[in-house]
Image: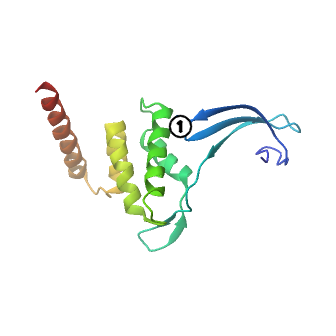
Amino acid sequence: MRCPYCSSEDSQVKDSRPAEDGAAIRRRRVCPDCGGRFTTFERVQLRELTVIKKTGRRVPFDRDKLMRSFEIALRKRPVERDRIERAVSAIVRRLESSGEQDIQSEQIGLLVIEALKALDDVGFVRYASVYRDFSGPEDFENVINELTARINADTTAAND
């Protein structure tokens, strides 16, 4: 693995352990040339996925971009990184096992919204405001009313 600091072709694995509920291997590495330390992840990739944007443009699926979307929506929220990793891994597994190589960006957005609803209500509203292209305060009010109705329904079901 190439060192991200000095571009040396050689690095040594110092520690390996399972990550993402066994779906990946986390490796701590050190560069013998510059002494830099870094982490890599090894994951199974079932197929090459292509995302079809709203404009019709086709781009390779990028797991890191999906992760960044979660991180932005959940910035400064009390959600453990491990839970975010599991949500991202679940979405990737779902996409890979769908049998489709071409995935509409809207489909990915819906999966993210679904996962964020389960993780954090504030993160869900943040993501929904961009994904659903909110244009005013009434859009936020509608989503908050939707969340409140869901919470009330969950509370009623739990009390029965």
Regarding residue 72, the answer to whether it shows in the image is no
Q: At 52% across and 62% down in the image, what residue appears?
A: 49
**Where on the picture, by quarter, is residue 144?**
top left
Nearer to us in this view, 147 or 141: 147
Where disc 1 sits, the SS reads: helix
- The outermost residue toward the left is 160
Horizontal placement of 114 versus 143: left or right?
right
Q: Position of residue 89 (x, y in %)?
A: 49, 45
Instruction: Determine which residue is flagged by label 1.
Output: 20
106 vs 6, left or right, is left
Residue 31: horizontal and vertical position, in percent? 83, 38
Quadrant housing residue 54 = bottom left
Q: Position of residue 126 (x, y in %)?
A: 36, 45
Residue at the spot 57% in from the left edge and 35% down from the top edge: 19
Instruction: Mark yes or no: residue 157 visible.
Output: yes
- Which residue is located at x 45 percent, y 33 percent? 76
- Farthest residue in the bottom direction? 56
Q: Nearer the viewer, residue 86 or 98?
A: 98
